[in-house]
Image (cartoon, rainbow, N blue to C red):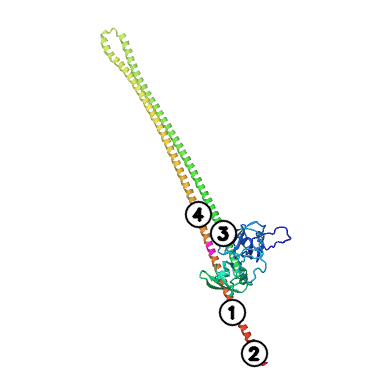
Amino acid sequence: MFLIPNIIPSPTHARPPPAGIGLKLNSKLSVVEVVPGGAADATGQFSVGDAVTHIDSKLVSGQKLADITHLLIGSEGSKVDITVLKGSGESTTIKLVRKPTPIQQPGTAAAVAQPPPKSEGPSKPITAKPDAPKPQSKPGIGILIQRSATGELSITEVAPGGIAARSGVRVGDVLTHIDARSVVGYTVRDAVPLIAGDGRGSVRLLLLRGESKSQVEVTLHRGGVEEAVNETAQRHDEALAARRDAEQRARKEAEENAQREIESAQSRHEETLRLRKEAEEHAIREQIRAQQEAEDAARAHEEALQLRMAAEEKARKEALEIASRSAAEEARRSETMAQQVSAQGITLEHETQFTAPLEHQRPQAKAYAAPVDDSLQDAGAVRQHAEEAASIEANEAARKHAEQQRLKEEAEDKAEQEAEERALREAQEAARKHAEQQRLLEEAEDKAEREAEQRALLEAQEAARKHAEAQRLQEEAEERSAKEAEERALREADEAARQHAEAQRLKEEAEERAAKEAEAKAKAEAEEA
């Protein structure tokens, strides 16, 4: 056991003494006594059995008391936060202001019956003074006693897990007898030494319980509080270690799950980028192919136009040549006929000159010349007809050429329009395919993201469920351990009581036998005398 701090001011020292918190701790950092008048006692929040876990948010559970003493001691008036674990499992942080701890002098709790002081108020603890410090429970059974205004010694606090708690002592019980000795009129300072004793053996208490004041007798075995506190602290340390292990495992699993999720997300992102790249490359290839098809269509159209123009030009030339040959042939025939007619006219004139005397033959000559004149007229008509036919053919050829030119232009316009429409349709189809691929890609990305979020949520819920399950199992294990420890301590206490009663019986029998033997011996000696 250690008193924190255990410092007595020296009158020869000019500097103010260090101040502490007024708690007595064991090697497991569990509270075994709240020093009366100290900083901890002023808060009224500390109880025997509380386990100190943190000092100023620093974890100290599992450390040695000598290693944390410097954290508890400081200058007077300085502040410190102490976190303790109650017997109920609740963790509480209590703010303290350090101050010098009053030291209880020997003999202040002497077992001397004294009348109750008149200055005590109803239901108030005794004021902590140097000559009359506030009584507290001693290591032994784990209770806190206060004296009321009517002089009754009431149990105001029972240490969780202590011998008194396991034996059935309750808060509010009124103490009337200690080992068959009446304590009516006793002060707390008188009763405490009788209950605590030397820390060994057992003590019987007679209590009045409830409004009916029914009598309850309990037998308590001293010396179990420290062991129970140590066991509680040990269970608390084991629980903290198990909790840290569970948290580390949960954190490690969460980190591994997060890492796997990140790697999966990266893989899905890379797959999405690859699909997007392939879609873009496919769209580019489709666009290039559409452009090539449009260019091929344009070249084919141009070649068709050139072939059509060549055919039309060839047909026009052939028509012109045919018309020219026909006109030339008609003109040649007409000229031949005219030459023949002229030759006949000359011959007739020559014959007339030499046949002038032959007047009697003139009528015959005129009759012969008449057909020649008709032939000349017919030749002129033929020439005129040939010229008219050639003009008509030339006009028809020009009309056909104009018609062919119009059809050519219409064909060119139609081909250009069809090429433009086809190119537009192909561009629209390529744009539609690209938009469809983009939509599918975005849907795939959204689906992958939703699946990743759902998977992460499920994993987080599963991790939380596992953590809650581990916490529940840990609490059940702690509860079973505490229950088993309590049952074991109760069995050990019962066994110790039984052994004590057996030893007492054997002792009484031995004393009785010794007394009988001594009496028989004395009687024999008397008879012999």
Circles 1 and 4 in contact, beta carbons < 8 Å: no
Would residue 190 be visible to someone looking at this image? yes
Looking at the image, tell me whether mark 3 or mark 1 is earlier in sequence order.
3
Residue extending furthest toward the top: 357
Viewer-side label of 4, 3:
3
Looking at the image, tell me whether mark 1 or mark 4 is earlier in sequence order.
4
What's the distance in space between the residues labelled 2 and 1, CA to CA?
31 Å
Check residue 472 for magenta coloring: yes
Q: Establish if 161 lies above or below 395.
A: below
Q: Establish if 276 lies above or below 214.
A: above
Mark 1 highlights which residue?
502
Position of residue 442 measured from the top left corner of the image (x, y, whole percent): 48, 46
> Residue, x 42% and y 30% (percent of image)?
309
Image quadrant occupied by the C terminus = bottom right
Identify the main secondary structure in magenta. helix
Label 1 Cα crowd, 10 Å radius (few <14 / some 14-19 / many 20+): few
